[in-house]
Image (cartoon, grey):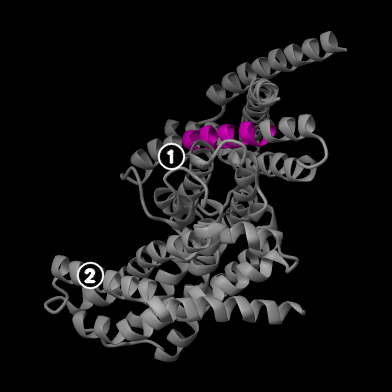
Amino acid sequence: MQGLKKASGIALFLATLLILIVGFQKAMVAPVDAQQGEVYRIFYYHVPSAISALCFPYINLIGALGYLYFRRKDEIKAAAWDALALAGAEITTVYCTIGLVTGSLWGRVAWGIWWTWDERLTTFLLLWLLYVSYLLLRRFSPPGQTSTLASVLSVFAAVDVPIVYYSIRWFRTQHPSPVFGGGDGAGLDKSMYPAFLWNLAGWFLWGCVMIGFRLISARRERLAELQEAI
Amino acid sequence: MNYLRTVWLHLEKELRLEFRSRDALMGMLFFTLLIVVVFSLAFDPTSQPTLARQIAGGLLWVGLLFASTTALNQSWSREMRNGVLDAQRMSPSPPSALFLGKALANFLFVTIVEVILAPIFFIFFNLHILGQASMLLALLPLGTWAIVVNGTFFAALGLRARSRELLLPLILFPIALPALLAMISAATGILTGEAEPQSALRILGIYDTVYTTVSLLLFETILSAE
């Protein structure tokens, strides 16, 4: 059973690498954007990491809710759920950072500025700040309470994510209106879809694999702490 | 004993304690006043009335946010003395009533600070409201509650943490930023008359409702965390 899990983990890892290689190739041969030229290709990395960064907070939330549910019933299970929450928060922070940095690089070329206090950029920065503050709370809180307090904060942070997401529709904005479901002029050219979808799948899976690895190591740490406490 | 009565008892206790010492009120008043003075010195608002109108909304809320974080920590550390918090934990009354009573008390204190300092603020920044002034009556309570409800909750959350004075702003500000954004854009809209504050007020309303609910539901968890 353990061997099977390990084998499927390795298989998923290799498949993700393969998808990323295909995605890279597709992104580099996709047609040039009529208005932006070659620089638009960063879009294939920026948008998948930004979309993933909006999904992974929910992994953190699921972990936190799982922890809150099990914390009185089964300490071992609770530790695993808490490890999932921690892994989710860390990978969210990493993906948010990638989204912010790639967006900033693109903004320098397309807008002529590295950063602008447009609502979508601001709210994405807020998402990053939220999960950094979550990781900080884990560092500061007293041992023994860390998981509970962090889980509670994670619920608060997850509630913030939809507010963050919808704010682009509430405030006027400089960010390109959403490419998907954004009304007139939205949508990708058909020839760009394969490159985009391969990269989206690749980077999303890469995030999941990383969460998996971190989950395993964080769970070991938690279990070792529990052992020590006994 | 029903729920509202318990909330009222907690609120009454907070008010009585506060009006005996008046520590939090005096501290917040003077702190906010100092921030207003520091900002006035930095920007010289009398010579630039347009700039003053555009930044005043932000400065007011930033000052109040800083001032409330100083007071919010105090409001819980009072409970640590003589093991009051452990007594609260063992009492049969619902824990969320304790939270609600404290949040309402803090809300009243911050509102008092606003009522006293708003005229001073208007004088120092030489402000004339160009938009709908009546909207301020909706904005101030909604904005104050947004700061206070999360602030009270996170002050309780960080109560037993290392360096909790530092921890509160670290976790409160990121969560409060969407609300702060809405508060500032509504205040600037009212002061300059260039934008309608309604949509920002709606966001604040949603924010307040959502976070009040979440805080009430989760307060028991953090009170009994060990």
Check if residue A88 falls in the magenta segment: yes
Mark number displayed over residue A36: 1
Q: Amino acid at mark 2?
A: Leu
Q: Is residue B93 above or below residue A127?
A: below
Picture coordinates of residue B200, whole percent (x, y): 50, 73
Picture coordinates of residue A149, whole percent (x, y): 61, 46
Query: Among all residues in the image, which is located at the extreme left?
Result: B47
Q: In the figure, residue A226 lies in which quadrant?
A: top right
Residue B45 visible (yes or no): yes
Residue positioned 56% across, 53% down in the render: B157
Horizontally, residue B147 falls left or right of residue B222, namely left
Residue neighbourhood size for the residue with mark 1, other residues' Cα within 10 Å, grouped as few (<14), some (14–19), many (≥20): few
- Same-chain check, marks 1 and 2: no
Horizontally, residue A56 falls left or right of residue B182, namely right
Check if residue A128 falls in the magenta segment: no
Q: Which residue is mark 2?
A: B34
